[in-house]
Amino acid sequence: MQAGKLAAIGQMSTSIAHELNQPLAALRTLSGNTVRFLERGALDTASANLKTINELIDRMGRITASLRSFARRGDDLGQASLGKAVDAALQLLGSRLESSELQLHRDFSDVQVQIDQTRLEQILVNLIGNALDAMQAQPQPELWLEGETVDGKYRLRVRDNGHGIDAETRKHLFEPFFTTKPGEQGLGLGLTLSASLAAATGGNLGVEHPASGGTAFVLSLPLVSPLQAEPI
C-alpha cells in the first residue's frame, strides 16, 4: 500500500500547480479589488479583502503540506466537517459560481467524516470545478449536492446537468494526466488525486451517469460517528 502511494505521489508531483490554481485566481481578483478600494478610501472593505488573502495563503501552505504528508502517512486520522468543507469550496469557486448563474441544490447533512479537512476541501473543489466546466454551455446550469449514509460511510453525490461523459472518456477518467480540457486548463490529475485521497481514508470516489443526463461523482467517506446532523 505504501509503495502504491509513493508511486501515485510521483505521478502527481506536477499537480501542485493544478491544486493551487483556484486560490491563485482568487488572490489575483482580491488583490486587484483591494487596490481599487484603497484608492476610494473604502478601508473596511480593503481590510476584509486582506484578511481573506491571508486565509488563502494559509490554505495554499496547507495544500502543499498535505501533498507531502500524503506520501509519508500510512493512514489518515483527521476529521472533517462536510458542511464546512462545502462552504470553503464554494467560496474558492465564488467568482465562477456568480458568473455561471448556477442553481445550487443542497441536500446533505453536516456530518463529521474521517479525512483531513484540507484534503476534503481539495476533493470538493475538484469535483465542483469539474461540474462547472461541464455546464459551460448549459443555459440553466444546476448542481445537486446530495448525501446519504450507507454502511457506516457518508456518500455525497456531486451531480450536474452538463454535457455528460462519452463512453470512451469514461474508460480513462481516473487515469493520471488524462484530460479533455484544452490547453493548460487541466493537467488531468484532479480526479486521480481526489480518488487517492479518498482511498487513503478507507473511502472511495466513483462516478455515475444518470439516464436524465449530466454526470454524478460519488464521494464515500467513513463517518466519525453514526449520529447525523440535520440536513443543511
Image (cartoon, rainbow, N blue to C red):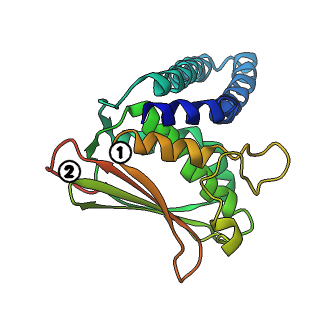
Q: Quadrant of the C terminus?
A: bottom left
Question: Closer to the camera, 170 or 65?
Answer: 170
Q: Position of residue 115 (x, y in %)?
A: 35, 37
Q: Residue furthest left?
A: 227
For residue 128, side relative to residue 11 (left or right) = left
Q: Secondary structure at mark 2?
A: loop
- The quarter holding residue 20 reads top right
Q: Are marks 1 and 2 in contact (CB under 8 Å)?
A: yes
Kind of residue indicated by mark 1: Gly
Residue at image point 70% right, 33% down: 25
Residue 90 in sight here: no
Residue at screen point 47% across, 38% down: 121
Dot placed on the residue nearer the N-terminal end, 1 or 2: 1
Name the residue rendered at 45%, 22% in the picture: 72
Residue 149 visible in the current orientation = yes
In the picture of the structure, the residue carrying the numbered disc 2 is 229
Picture coordinates of residue 59 (x, y %)?
A: 52, 24
Residue with the mark numbered 1: 83
Q: Is residue 131 above or below residue 112?
A: below
Mark 1 neighbour class, 10 Å CA radius: few under 14, some 14 to 19, many 20 or more: some
